[in-house]
Image: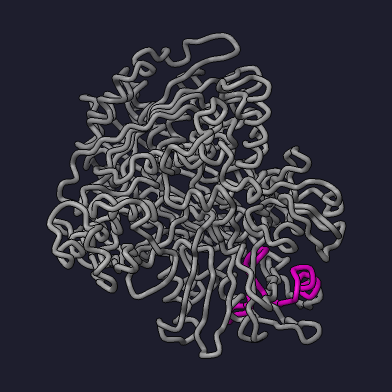
């Protein structure tokens, strides 16, 4: 078939009924158009057809014949929208960016033709881009960029891009794992269990296709979607057909499909032996799960309390005397799915010398390389992992996961490169999630209004995974008063949970911060003043003072005092977070052709570390942009951190600064620019290291290169909501985020991270919830229509305030922010709803039907 794309004709051998996105990506090779949802929901595959934006995943290829098609590549980086996106950092991981840019370009052209060079309203921009999703949450900057482009502010090139890879992402040139095309590549498909619990008697593949058995040693599957086998074919359709012919003989075992049923006497066991329990995956992050007892499907308690017996006794005595200063409640949070727009994917290629190339969408280039070498019995230097750009992760891509193992095994059998890309249903059902929780809280104040006791019992619902650490985080906040903190894992035949941005933090904050607000009501005290009085984090005291002075806070309405359909509420929540660092991080600088080239084994999934490295070197060495080049996203000899636990910037930035210092010494330049020395310094090489903090670390040794630093970062969020008491709809209208994390290496990128964190927190509070069929265990929300994440129309106005003091003992003076900035957001939304209506929400998400029922009662 003949198609005309970006002014050029192509002859493509394609099925006319195939989606147009497939023709553009595979037939024409224009990979800027991304396939994410396949259902017209996310907008990532948007192209212009005869000037009209259309989603190409729903457009038959035949519809392209005889029409003018413009992809993001066709805009050539010269459209004002593209320049505006680059200038205002209207992107993070960049996977959704081409779709936004193509739609935005059409909107800006149309708007300016009709209205002239004036900015549209936020509502008009949101309406125009409502068919697009950004999981990173770059919406605030997208609003700003579109408005600026409409005024003509970016008709010429006059602003440095906010991040060094911005032009690659806004033009579609950025190459993600899903875009890797190797000659002779095959496609791999995973055969997954259709049973939630069964013994697999046999697995047989038809024909001579490449085939891999993926079952564990006991041959038992414990959830729907668990990998059983994998096959390869020349195309995805051929591999899927081969997968459908794989014969699996099941011996069904009784399943337990929800947490309530799992705790009943005589419930079927998910793990029946000590060995099985020991091999259970973990939904936690960093430290291993604490040893504890098991009672059927319940593991725990794991306790991290302080004077737990005293706390329990005081709470029980308060109950007996019906003490009004005792707040007791049961809170729940749902399963929240990571929903990265680039799915888990891998391309594996075995070289003739026995080495292995893995192109992986991962947050952990170095760790994946190490795990792959161990898995296949290779020397570390024989494994080469590449993640040039990563389309989001949020904690789900920190290990050697199934798609990489499958691609490597199939490639070895087929003696050809093999690509495995999970579809959206797989991404939303089997790649991990934030476990659901049920939390029982008792919070007691004494006669002076001080915290007298806190007890938290948390039952985590992480499927077949263990490692709930929600209650344990209650040890880190509000002083050292007596507290009993107990975590339980409730095992079910559901896919395993996984670490998700601030593991355990948002559910803990939801329960505790909601309880703190209720205590403020009982004591008749300002909620910010109460927190400040109870809180021992001095760095956060400055944030309380800032929040208390906000006009929105000083003018907030009395709780439950409003009438009428629309009611405004203001809520606050605070959060503590640990400071993590990879003290073994190294950054290598090499002078190459008059350019300083920086290398380290780290990856950029939208957080901006590539730009942080570039900015430090440009500043410390006095060089223009084009004399610094950063190569990351590849495994190599220079150790770098996993992008998890908010450790990346506080690990890499100081090592970069140390490398710049060493290069100055090597070139004999004490001050000023080193540019004049580079021409005769080719081959000069230095390696900077992340120096130890002045006061050392809390942990005596690193675990998987991770150390816990001294001190806690802090956050205070103030949120304004509008509640429609007729329809039950809640809209977050404004959020103020105060962050105490010390030195900020790049203000614009840091604000972008905080804005995205806040938007994910709003999603956790109001929209996101996985639904499972209680009779079969099948995940029902396996698409982006049914699993609801925030869109641009759900974005509140956001103001971020940084407090820089208190981290002088840290090398570099600053710690991570990506997790801290989301922890208390949902709780601040809940407290704002309480302020607006007088009703106290206890379950997330705060659904319209539950809100209406609560107001009525």
Q: Residue 406 at what x, y percent from top left?
A: 61, 75
Write down the quadrant of residue 405 in the picture. bottom right
At horizontal 27% and vertical 61% (from top left) the residue drawn is 707
In the image, is residue 228 part of the stretch drawn in magenta? yes
Front residue of 528/610: it is 610
At horizontal 55% and vertical 85% (from top left) the residue drawn is 351
> Does residue 476 lie above or below 109 as drawn?
below
List the single residue furthest toward the bottom: 353
> Does residue 641 lie above or below 80 as drawn?
below
Front residue of 168/788: it is 168
Q: Residue 479 at what x, y percent from top left?
A: 22, 39
Q: Specify the quadrant that holds the C terminus.
A: top right
Q: Is residue 316 visible?
A: no
Front residue of 437/701: it is 701
At horizontal 61% and vertical 85% (from top left) the residue drawn is 412
Q: Is residue 250 visible?
A: yes
Q: How is the image coloured?
A: one colour
At horizontal 71% and vertical 71% (from top left) the residue drawn is 191
In the image, is residue 539 part of the stretch drawn in magenta? no
Extent of the magenta region = 214-243
Instruction: Please state the total of marks drawn on the protein image.
Output: 0
Front residue of 61/514: it is 61
> Does residue 22 lie above or below 416 as drawn?
above
Q: Specify the quadrant that holds the N terminus.
A: bottom right
> Does residue 800 lie above or below 663 as drawn?
above
Q: Residue 617 at what x, y percent from top left?
A: 28, 55
């Amino acid at each position: 078939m003949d198609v005309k794309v970006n002014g050029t004709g192509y002859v493509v051998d394609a099925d006319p009924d195939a989606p147009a996105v497939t023709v553009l990506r595979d037939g024409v090779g224009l990979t800027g158009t991304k396939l994410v949802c396949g259902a017209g929901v996310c907008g990532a595959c948007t192209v212009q057809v005869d000037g009209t934006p259309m989603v190409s995943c729903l457009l038959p290829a035949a519809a392209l014949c005889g029409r003018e098609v413009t992809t993001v590549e066709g805009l050539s980086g010269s459209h004002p929208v593209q320049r505006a996106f680059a200038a205002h950092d209207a992107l993070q991981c960049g996977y959704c960016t081409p779709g936004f840019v193509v739609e935005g370009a059409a909107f800006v052209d149309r708007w300016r033709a009709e209205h002239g060079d004036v900015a549209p309203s936020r509502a008009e921009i949101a309406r125009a881009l409502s068919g697009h999703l950004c999981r990173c949450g770059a919406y605030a900057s997208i609003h700003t960029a579109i408005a600026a482009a409409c005024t003509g502010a970016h008709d010429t090139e006059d602003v440095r891009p906010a991040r060094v890879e911005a032009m690659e992402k806004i033009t579609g040139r950025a190459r993600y794992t899903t875009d890797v095309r190797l000659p002779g590549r095959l496609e791999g498909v995973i055969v997954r269990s259709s049973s939630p619990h069964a013994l697999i008697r046999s697995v047989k593949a038809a024909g001579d296709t490449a085939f891999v058995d993926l079952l564990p040693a006991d041959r038992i599957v414990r959830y729907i979607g668990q990998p059983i086998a994998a096959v390869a074919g020349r195309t995805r359709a051929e591999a899927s057909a081969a997968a459908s012919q794989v014969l699996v003989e099941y011996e069904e075992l009784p399943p337990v499909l929800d947490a309530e049923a799992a705790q009943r006497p005589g419930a079927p066991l998910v793990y029946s032996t000590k060995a099985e329990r020991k091999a259970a995956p973990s939904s936690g992050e960093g430290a291993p799960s604490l040893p504890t007892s098991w009672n059927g499907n319940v593991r725990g308690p794991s306790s991290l309390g302080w004077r737990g017996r005293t706390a329990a006794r005081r709470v029980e005595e308060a109950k007996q005397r019906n003490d009004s200063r005792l707040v007791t409640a049961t809170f729940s949070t749902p399963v929240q799915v990571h929903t990265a727009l680039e799915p888990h994917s891998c391309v594996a290629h075995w070289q003739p010398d026995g080495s292995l190339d893995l192109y992986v969408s991962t947050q952990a280039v170095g760790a994946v390389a190490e795990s792959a070498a161990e898995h296949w019995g290779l020397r570390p230097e024989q494994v080469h992992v590449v993640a040039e750009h990563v389309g989001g992760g949020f904690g789900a891509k920190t290990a050697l996961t199934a798609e990489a193992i499958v691609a490597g095994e199939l490639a070895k059998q087929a003696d050809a490169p093999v690509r495995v890309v999970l579809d959206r249903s797989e991404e939303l059902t089997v790649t991990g999630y934030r476990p659901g929780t049920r939390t029982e809280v008792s919070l007691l104040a004494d006669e002076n209004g001080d915290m007298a006791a806190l007890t938290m019992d948390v039952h985590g619902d992480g499927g077949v995974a263990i490692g709930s650490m929600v209650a344990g985080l209650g040890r880190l906040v509000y002083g050292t008063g007596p507290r009993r903190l107990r975590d339980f894992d409730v095992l079910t035949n559901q896919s395993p949970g996984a670490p998700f941005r601030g593991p355990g933090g948002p559910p803990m904050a939801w329960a505790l911060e909601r309880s703190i607000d209720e205590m403020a009501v009982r004591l008749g005290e300002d909620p910010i003043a109460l927190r400040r009085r109870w809180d021992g984090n001095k760095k956060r005291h400055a944030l309380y003072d800032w929040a208390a002075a906000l006009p929105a806070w000083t003018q907030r309405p009395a709780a439950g005092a409003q009438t009428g359909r629309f009611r405004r509420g203001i809520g606050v929540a605070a959060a503590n977070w640990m400071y993590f660092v990879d003290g073994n991080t190294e950054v290598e600088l090499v002078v190459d052709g008059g350019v300083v080239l920086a290398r380290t084994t780290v990856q950029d999934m939208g957080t901006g570390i590539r730009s942080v490295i570039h900015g430090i070197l440009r500043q410390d060495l006095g060089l223009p942009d084009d004399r610094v080049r950063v190569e990351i996203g590849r495994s190599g000899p220079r150790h770098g951190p996993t992008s998890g636990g908010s450790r990346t910037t506080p690990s890499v930035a100081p090592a970069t600064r140390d490398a710049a210092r060493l290069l100055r010494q090597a070139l004999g330049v004490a001050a000023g620019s080193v540019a004049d020395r580079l021409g005769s310094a080719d081959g000069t090489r230095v390696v900077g290291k992340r120096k130890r903090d002045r006061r050392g670390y809390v942990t005596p040794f690193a675990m998987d290169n991770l150390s816990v630093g001294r001190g806690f970062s802090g956050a205070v969020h103030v949120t304004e909501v509008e509640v429609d008491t007729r329809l039950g709809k809640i809209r977050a209208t404004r959020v103020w985020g105060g962050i105490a994390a010390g030195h900020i290496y790049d203000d614009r990128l840091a604000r972008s991270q905080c804005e995205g964190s806040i938007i994910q927190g709003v999603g956790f509070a109001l929209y996101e919830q996985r639904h499972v069929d209680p009779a079969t265990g099948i995940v029902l929300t396996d698409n982006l229509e049914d699993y609801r994440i925030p869109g641009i129309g759900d974005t509140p106005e956001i103001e971020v305030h940084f407090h820089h003091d208190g981290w002088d003992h840290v090398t570099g003076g600053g710690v991570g922010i990506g997790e801290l900035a989301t922890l208390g957001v949902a709780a601040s939304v809940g407290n704002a709803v309480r302020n607006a209506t007088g009703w106290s929400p206890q379950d997330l998400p705060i659904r319209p039907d539950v809100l209406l029922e609560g107001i009525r009662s």
